[in-house]
Amino acid sequence: MNYCQKIHYTVYATQRAGFPEMVDNLLSQLPENETILRLSFFGTPSSNIEYVERRVILRKKIRAYYGDREPALSYVSQPPMDAPLIMEVHSYRLEDEEQVTFRHFCGLPYVILENECARFLFAGGFQGDVINYNIEQQSADVFNTIMIVLKKEGFPINSIIRQWNYIEHITAFDGENQHYQSFNNARTDFYKKARWTNGYPAATGIGASFGGVLVDLDAAILKDSMHVVPIDNKLQVAAYAYSEQVLAVSGEQKTTPKFERAKSLVCNKNQIIYISGTAAIRGENSLADIGLEQQLRITMENIDQLAGNARLCILRVYLKDRSFYEEARRLMEAYHLNIPVFYMCADICRNELLIEIEGIARL
């Protein structure tokens, strides 16, 4: 078995209790026979002050639980639709000839895995000062920290293959600067430092209730047995090729979102496809005023274009409003996917979009 077969994606939920008790309950459900690479918690703090307090509790819990083997960790302020707190787990069946190393930078844990396919980096929890700084400053600080970690571990910037970007009130403005556009400007400045000959990372840019700017990422330095391929959707314009008509004004700077619609990792005829945040966009335009059911259908058609013959193994569904949950779940169940599907309440990067879906597929 190789990397594409041995990495697993699972979601766990807990019943309502105090925040520390809910974290304990989730950790008690973790598989004991796998190496945990990443833990992403999704919850509902009531303010940025409470968000920071809970993030401190979470970090202490994980440190006490894992000791010197802490996985990459993030706490995302997005209300789950069917539980008070959920945990997404990326785990791996480690074999004798493979090496895994657990490291820290300024309190942030991350994991390095090396096997016959590649040298992988699993990192997350990159954040600026969520209390005192605006989105523009936070974005710059986040990418500066990412650059330091990548350089420290010998990963070039263009080794990033998957990126999750959570942006507080993503469509809100600081003066004339829209939060998402400010983030995109900072991302563009960061990516300019590299040549992206194999395409940009797959990525999601999604709203969060609190937490400022939060970035998680996977990176890989490939060996001869593995290669990476960007995947386009023939029904959509590539996000990095958008015209100015679909970009929000942000001062004098106005750059496009730099990501691929999907990214494929191939190792010995096995394949993992990272599907970026996907919505009801055709060409570069949102299909607005058609309702949730039609937006969901078109979103799933776009995902089908990206996944091809690969089988979906996990999906995150982001809904603009809580009231959409029952309808969205009913519509998704009609696809009979039989995989983990979890639902978050989150702002989408365009006001007219009601739903966005991301996922991972395996062939």
Image (cartoon, rainbow, N blue to C red):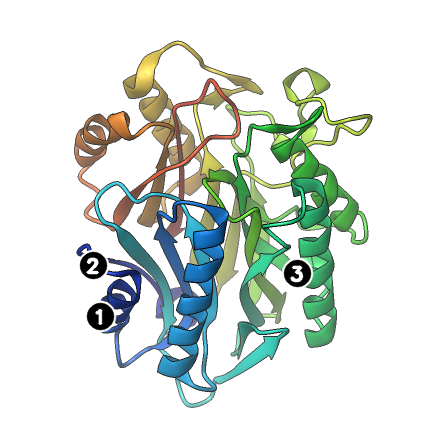
The quadrant holding residue 158 is bottom right
| Disc 3 from disc 2: Cα separation | 40 Å
Give the residue at the far top of this rendering.
289
Mark 3 or mark 2, which is nearer to you?
Answer: 2
Report which residue position mark 3 lands on.
Answer: 159
Which of the pair 164/238 is nearer the observer?
164
Mark closer to the chain start, 3 or 2:
2
Mark closer to the chain start, 3 or 1:
1
Q: In the picture shown, does residue 175 fall above or below 257? A: above
Res 67 visible:
yes
Name the amino acid, label 3.
Ser
Residue 99 at x, y = what percent? 50, 85
Res 363 visible:
no
Mark 3 or mark 1, which is nearer to you?
Answer: 1
Q: Which residue is drawn at 72% across and 46% down?
A: 137
Mark 1 or mark 2, which is nearer to you?
Answer: 2
Residue 128, labelled with which disc? none
Report which residue position mark 1 lands on.
Answer: 29
Q: Which residue is drawn at 23% across and 33% down?
A: 332
Q: How crowded is mark 1: few (under 14 residues within 10 Å), some or many (20 or more)?
A: few
Q: In the picture shown, does residue 289 fall above or below 38? A: above
Q: How crowded is mark 2: few (under 14 residues within 10 Å), some or many (20 or more)?
A: few
Give the secondary structure at mark 3: helix
| Disc 3 from disc 1: Cα separation | 32 Å
Q: In the picture shown, does residue 169 fall above or below 56? A: above
Say left or right for 23 vs 14: right
Q: Residue at x 46, y 67 (%)?
A: 56
Report which residue position mark 2 lands on.
Answer: 17
